[in-house]
């Protein structure tokens, strides 16, 4: 048996739904395609805003000199006895 990806080809069901819509209401179909793209863009912008806020919080914490408590030194890091 062989398996392969369907690739970027639309399915027959998708074509059956879109073709009559484009034929009957071209403005409505175009608007639906545009708004779908806008929704994806909005979610990407929201994700970038979240990452930016988290980064700003981390920078503010470092600027306030609030940091994690260091771990105890390992044997290799200890100073030799005098």
Image (spheres, grey):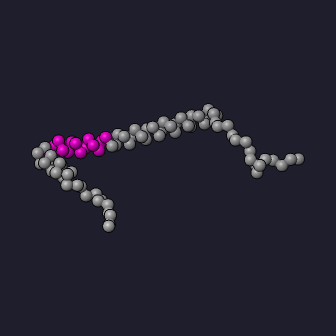
View extreme (bottom): residue? 1
Residue occupying the point 24% across, 45% down:
33
- Residue 31 appears at what percent x and percent y? 21, 42
The image quadrant where one finds the N terminus is: bottom left
Q: Nearer the viewer, residue 38 or 73?
A: 73
Residue 41 sits in quarter: top left
Report the residue at 25% width, 44% height from top.
Answer: 34
- Magenta-tinted stretch: 26-39
Q: Is residue 74 left or right of residue 39?
A: right
Q: Is residue 44 above or below residue 13?
A: above
Number of numbered discs: 0
Q: Residue at x 13, y 43 (%)?
A: 25
Name the magenta segment's main secondary structure.
helix
Q: Position of residue 17 (x, y in %)?
A: 17, 48
Q: Does residue 23 lie above or below 5 as drawn?
A: above
Point out the residue furthest to the left here.
24
Determine which quarter of the picture holds residue 4. Answer: bottom left
- Residue appearing at x 77%, y 49% in the figure: 75
> Residue 64, image x and y in percent?
62, 32
Q: Is residue 35 magenta?
A: yes
Q: Magenta span has 72?
A: no
């Amino acid at each position: 048996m062989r398996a392969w990806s369907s690739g970027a080809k639309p399915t027959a069901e998708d074509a059956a739904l879109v073709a009559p819509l484009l034929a009957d209401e071209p403005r409505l179909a175009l608007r639906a395609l545009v708004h779908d793209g806008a929704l994806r863009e909005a979610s990407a912008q929201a994700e970038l805003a979240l990452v930016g806020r988290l980064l700003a919080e981390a920078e503010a914490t470092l600027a306030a000199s609030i940091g994690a408590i260091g771990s105890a030194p390992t044997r290799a890091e200890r100073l030799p006895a005098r």
